[in-house]
């Protein structure tokens, strides 16, 4: 057995781990920065000692009939957070779409309140 090859393999594995970890952390840090107080901590997922992904929990807004503008603002923050990385994942697009639906509902609610006010 050639110990040089084992050493080279370990070195390559360490480089891969550092590269993966850096890319994953950069992606998740973008979510966290854009999501602010609506986000939880960055979590890195590992398999066999290698980072394979990550996530940041975000509080999805609920439709607030008493304050639709707050719902709109929070939904926009979720959208911004989901789309913040330079390489959004399929899950990021799903989260953004869900927040967009909530935002649209709140905007309709807000517009209806304005119509009622002026009626």
Image (cartoon, rainbow, N blue to C red):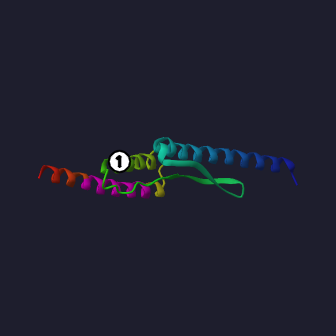
x and y, in percent, of residue 12 in the image: 72, 47
Q: Residue furthest right?
A: 1
Please give the name of the residue rendered at 35% of the width and 51% of the height, measured from the top-left corner.
71
Q: Residue at x 54, y 47 (%)?
A: 28
What is the quadrant of the N terminus in the image? bottom right
Q: Is residue 42 left or right of residue 96?
A: right
Q: Residue 6: in sight, yes or no?
A: yes
Residue 50, image x and y in percent?
68, 53
Q: Write down the residue under mark 1.
A: 70
* Rendered location of residue 15, percent (x, y): 69, 44
Q: Nearer the viewer, residue 19 or 71?
A: 71
- Residue 85 seen in render: no
| Residue 92 to residue 77: above or below | below
View extreme (left): residue: 119
- Numbered range of the magenta stretch: 93-109
Q: Secondary structure at mark 1?
A: helix
Tally of marks: 1
Residue 30 image point, x, y percent = 50, 43
- Left or right of residue 23: residue 33: left
Residue 18: quarter of image: top right
Magenta stretch: includes residue 30 = no
Residue found 43% across the figure and 56% down from its top: 95
The stretch drawn in magenta includes residue 97: yes
> In the picture provided, is 76 more to the left or to the right than 45?
left
Q: Locate residue 2 relative to residue 108 in the image: left or right.
A: right
Q: Nearer the viewer, residue 1 or 34?
A: 34
Graded by Cα atoms within 10 Å as few (under 14), some (14 to 19) or many (20 or more), the crowding at tag 1 reads some
Residue at the image position 29 percent from the left and 57 percent from the top: 105
């Amino acid at each position: 057995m050639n110990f040089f090859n084992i050493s080279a393999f370990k070195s390559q594995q360490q480089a891969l781990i550092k590269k993966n970890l850096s890319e994953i952390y950069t992606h998740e840090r973008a979510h966290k920065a854009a999501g602010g107080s609506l986000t939880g901590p960055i979590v890195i997922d590992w398999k066999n000692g290698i980072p394979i992904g990550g996530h940041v929990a975000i509080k999805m807004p609920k439709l607030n009939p008493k304050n639709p503008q707050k719902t709109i603002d929070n939904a926009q923050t979720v959208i911004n957070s989901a789309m913040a990385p330079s390489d959004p994942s399929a899950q990021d697009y799903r989260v953004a779409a869900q927040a967009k639906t909530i935002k649209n509902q709140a905007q309709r609610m807000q517009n209806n309140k304005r119509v009622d006010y002026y009626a």
